Image: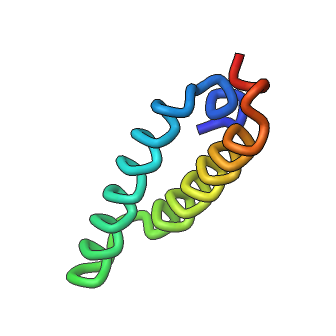
Amino acid sequence: MKYSEIKALTLVELKERLATEKTNSQNLRFAHSISPLENPLKIKESRKIIAKLKTELRAKELNPSSQL
């Protein structure tokens, strides 16, 4: 997910996407611990997406005028 796509999301959409991505990340880690994933870099990518979502969520919380 590109940062420009994340920036276009509203607060509610960011929170929903963050919850979905956290669940996805947890499922990937569980699956990887049971049997190795075909592409373990998906775990790293998922962590980066979560970080981007959290960063944008915090920025929008601090500056409500940017939500317009």
Image quarter where the N terminus lies is: top right
Image check: 44 left or right of 24? right
Q: As displayed, is residue 46 above or below residue 18?
A: below
Residue at image point 63% right, 58% down: 51
Q: How was the colour assigned to the protein in this rendering?
A: rainbow
Q: Position of residue 25 (x, y in %)?
A: 39, 62
Task: State the residue in front, 52 or 34.
Answer: 52
- Give the tally of numbered discs: 0
- Residue 55 shown left or right of residue 17 in the figure: right
> Looking at this rendering, what residue extends furthest in the bottom direction?
33
Question: Residue 47: x percent and y percent?
Answer: 55, 63
**Residue name at image x 69 percent, y 24 percent:** 67
Q: Is residue 8 left or right of residue 62?
A: left
Query: Above or below — where is 29 with respect to 66?
Result: below
Which quarter of the image is occupied by the C terminus? Answer: top right
**Residue 68 placement, left or right of 44:** right
x and y percentages locating residue 37 in the rendered image = 33, 70
- Residue 41 point in image, percent of width and height: 52, 65
| Residue found at x 34% / y 74% | 29
Residue at x 66%, y 50% (from the top left corner): 52
- The vertical placement of 60 against 23, above or below, is above
In depth, the one of 62 and 16 nearer the eye is 62
Residue furthest to the left in view is: 34
Q: Would you identify the image quadrant in which residue 2 lies?
A: top right
